[in-house]
Amino acid sequence: MSWAASIPELLLRLAELPFLDRLELLAVSGWSRGVVYEGVRRLEQAGLAASIPHATELIAHTRRFHLTAAGVRALAREEGMDEEELLQQRPVSSQWQRILLARLDAVAAIYRLACAVSDVSRPIGFRWYRGLPLDAAITVPDGRCLGVVRVGRSADRTGLANRLWRLRVGSLPGAVLLLLPDEVRLRHARGLLAGFPVPAVMALEREATLAPDGAIWRLPTVNAAISLEAVLNRAVPHGVLPEERPLARLTPPAAPAVDSRGLDVPDSLLPALLRPAEKRALDILADWPWLSSEHLQALLGLSRPRTAQIISALRDHGLAARAPSAEGRLVLTERGLTLIARRDRTSAGLAKQRWSAAPLDSGAAGGWRDVAGRRSRQLLRNIEHTASVHGFIAALAAQSRALGWELVQLDPPHRASRYFRSDGRVRSVLPDAFAVLRREGRVWPCFVEWERRAVRPSTMAAKLAPYLRYYVSPRPTDDHGARPAVLVVFSDELAAHHFLRVATSETERANVELALRVTHKGLLAKEGPLGAVWLSLGGGWEPGCAFPSD
């Protein structure tokens, strides 16, 4: 096919899949590189298409293309319909443009999955959803259809459960593909998918983006992974794509002002303008409010000047701020919280109720009582403890890089908590952090507790009790694939030794095997979390490493 003959098809593809880049357009069309690249260039020259920059941690810098108002008119003429009808049938309106731009990072991940499906069975059809549980749907030539659900970093377990429940009670495609951000939520989703009416498979978003052709798709009922081709073979032929009520108001697309800067940039354009390091910093600040610049630098693994540039960029865009009430520590603004919520399709209002660092009123004195967000207020109230936990995770990140460990996962308290049933009641463990390290192919998960209040035998036993209930069940292995260690840090050496004696007595009484490691702040400051600073049950009083080094 020549580039001239491809122009109508390119317009149609960009109407069906707005914000494709050229490599993705190449994959879904099946045409040669020369035809696609030249056709896109001609569309831009003619003013029928425009592009915006985009990059994520997983996807290198690229340019994503969309139809202009002139392109929409040209396609409407080509299809023999009026412009208004085309705006109703395809996601090319100004309103759809804002929706997809706000989700641009998720859009890119789902497009990479669509490219992988196209490699297996071409040509594909594609449909975006804005308010249904599905993010998108992909159809293949034999009529089968696949639903795609992308779960973002900020989504909590309740939101995921509600979303899958809503999916069950509606029209179901032939199979459902879930993209998840980490192993813990993948395992949680596996439990929610038990008995799902149609085949459902899960994959980590990182793997689906970087290695979509591999056997990365996990089944809910067995510990096995299959390829995308096998997933397509499992899809039932009688699947139905759900229908969504069209937008009430539709206007032709406007050219995004990608050259704007700072607060003048529309919220929907920020995912296109932020660099990958800035997006990563945004996610870190969402996880760990009231973070100091030094701790952010350690978590990013960048130099001090580069970290200062990133902080400056986030502040210029109105996404982060320094809090005078917390010694200039960094927090997300309500604009930053909204950006993440829209990207991950979670509630921006709920995020602000929980995490807003804004004062309750303009005349507030600036103390912790005046912070609007419930959880932000609690963290600021206990800022000394909060800063201690931040110091631990920052040291863990820095030392992991220095010693050749990979910090695979690092969860804040609201994601580190685990809920389970014991004695007919719902119980929980509520650690200060959860981490997963990997070295030479082996994974080492751990809970982290920075302890200040357990100073008497009774309070120490009460602190330990939730973990004993958790570890007497099979849930630790079910949740993580291995039994996590429990790392407990005390302020002084005497409390650490006392806690270890109490823990020895309690684990023996409960007959529970617990990989408990205990240390104190002074020793930790000298050797770091991966050093020989941890006392263990039955290990005597000589400190050792939390994880084997060989």
Image: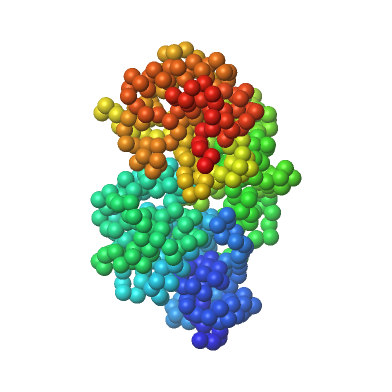
- Direction from residue 502 to residue 5 in the image, left or right: right
Is residue 218 shown above or below 122? above
The percent coordinates of residue 161 (x first, y second) are 35, 45
- The location of residue 92, given as percent across then percent down, is 50, 67
Q: Quadrant of residue 391?
A: top right
Name the residue at 41% across, 20% down.
Answer: 504
Q: Is residue 447 depicted above or below 39 in this figure? A: above
Can you give x and y, in whole percent of width and height, for residue 151 in the image?
43, 50
Which residue: 25% across, 55% down?
197
Q: Nearer the viewer, residue 263 or 169?
A: 169
* Color encoding of the figure: rainbow
What residue sits 64% from the left and 54% below the top?
A: 275
Residue positioned 45% across, 47% down in the render: 182
> Does residue 217 appear to the left or right of 517 in the view shown?
left
Residue 472, compared with residue 122, is above or below; it is above
Residue 116 appears in which quarter of the rendering? Answer: bottom left
Viewer-side residue, 44 vs 283 = 283
Say whether residue 66 is visible. no
**Corner quadrant of residue 293:** top right
